[in-house]
Image: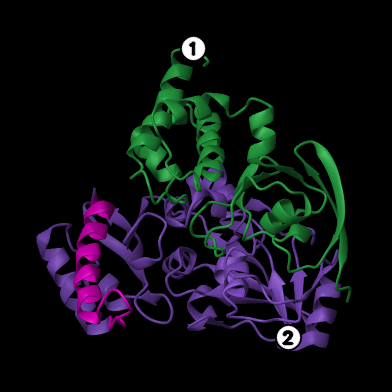
Amino acid sequence: MERVIEITLIVNSTPATRRVAPRTHLIDFLREELGLTGAHVGCEHGVCGACTVRVDGKIVRGCLTLAVQANGRRVDTVEGLSDSGELSALQQAFHERNAFQCGFCTPGMLIAAQDLVERKPMATREDIREHLSGNYCRCTGYQAIVDAVEAVLLDRRAGAPR
Amino acid sequence: MKAPPFAYVKPRSIEQVFDLLLQYGDRARILAGGQSLLAALNLRLSAPELLIDITALPGMADIALHGETVRIGALVTHAELERSAVIARHVPLLASAVPHIAHVAIRNVGTFGGSIALADPAAEYPACAAALGATFTLAGKGGERRVPAREFFKGLYETALQPGEVLIAGEFPVRAAGERTAFLELARRHGDYAMIGVAACARMDSGRFADARLAFFGVGDKPVLAARTGTVVEGRASGPEAIAAAQAALTTELHPAGDLHTSSSAKMHLAKVLTSRALTALAS
């Protein structure tokens, strides 16, 4: 049984091929092999959501995914989604409403929030809280985060892309 | 923490899985979504030599309606169950259970089969399976066998799966005409492990309960089907008397084990509260 496996991931639209130990988490692969340190390592057992990234368009826990499991898949991180402009409305709203203090949770929070904005345009405040319930913030008390996400949803519904 | 070292293989055929399980025995673990397994590895609660990733196996990722049965492949994710029109229509109890499972990012990856095979006593699907009388298909080198859900769960993380066997699918009876379902769970925060919960179903015949089944989870080492409680409301009109009778019966057959956060007596109290709410929901 091979102890090191060659994998190829499409990370932020660019193929990356590396040899990894099977125990390597996707989040550590992104941070340490590819230098993409936007997504953070928090609890390492799936509770805090700081490591949230997208695999094949779906949000996942980077600490509960092995890099080998993502072999052949498309991975999007906060870096790629910032560069493409996809997160810009949320980023602007987070900035305007002080929806972060230390910023540790913010990359995961943005990716999780964007998932809601895309999939449930009519989401209520309660929906926002439920959708973000897997992402911990230890600074803000969440109120400002919910405000920011709601502002983006309302703008979109009003047909005014930020 | 980081997971301990292990080898990894992703077989294309189930025969290959059987061979590896035979060769490695309990030094191998099956990996599907990994949303419980990887957390356990990261916490160093488990240190297998080999992970066998079964997500490339064919024919295990579908939800299919066959006559009076809905077959759910072991690799179907929670998110797929949540969105499935077949599940919403024919097994609504499962559809109402899914939102209680962890969070979106975990539901996108975690699987039906993983939850059943792990048999966490606080998990949602095992209680639904016990209430609805589901059947699981297990496959091994010698062929397939089918085990009723009520015999499948043996104890804490213990199931009828024998060494070398893989859970392939679950089969749920389609909702009978007039059957109603209710799924209730109490947790400290949304997505947390259940303190206690109940999966319930019944028919209402002219306002009277018929064939009521209540399966509790988070009360011990496995889901508990409260048979006497179901029987005692049979033929009774919904209302305070039926609820009181059910609660009295429940105290004779449910003996919840306390845990770190909730004592046995608090769980018993909550079980009665949930019984009341479930019967009210079924009747409304």
Q: How many marks?
A: 2
Q: Can residue B192 be seen in this view?
A: yes
Foreground pick, B160 / B204: B160
Chain for mark 1? A
Q: Which residue lies furthest to the front in this view?
A: A102
Give the chain letter for purple.
B
- Picture quadrant of residue A158: top left
Q: What residue type is labelled 1?
A: Gly
Q: What residue type is labelled 2?
A: Arg
> Callout 1: 10 Å neighbours few (<14), some, many (20+)?
few
Label 2 and label 1: CA atoms lie apart by 56 Å
Q: Does B194 sit left or right of B10 as displayed?
A: left
In x, y percent, where is residue B80? 59, 48
Rendering colour (chain A):
green
> Callout 2: 10 Å neighbours few (<14), some, many (20+)?
some
Magenta residues? Answer: B254-283
Foreground pick, B131 / B118: B118
Q: Report if the CB atoms under discs 2 and 1 are less than 8 Å apart.
A: no
According to the image, label 2 marks what residue? Answer: B27
Do marks 2 and 1 share a chain?
A: no
Seen in the picture, residue B66 relative to A145 is either above or below; the reply is: below
According to the image, label 1 marks what residue? Answer: A159
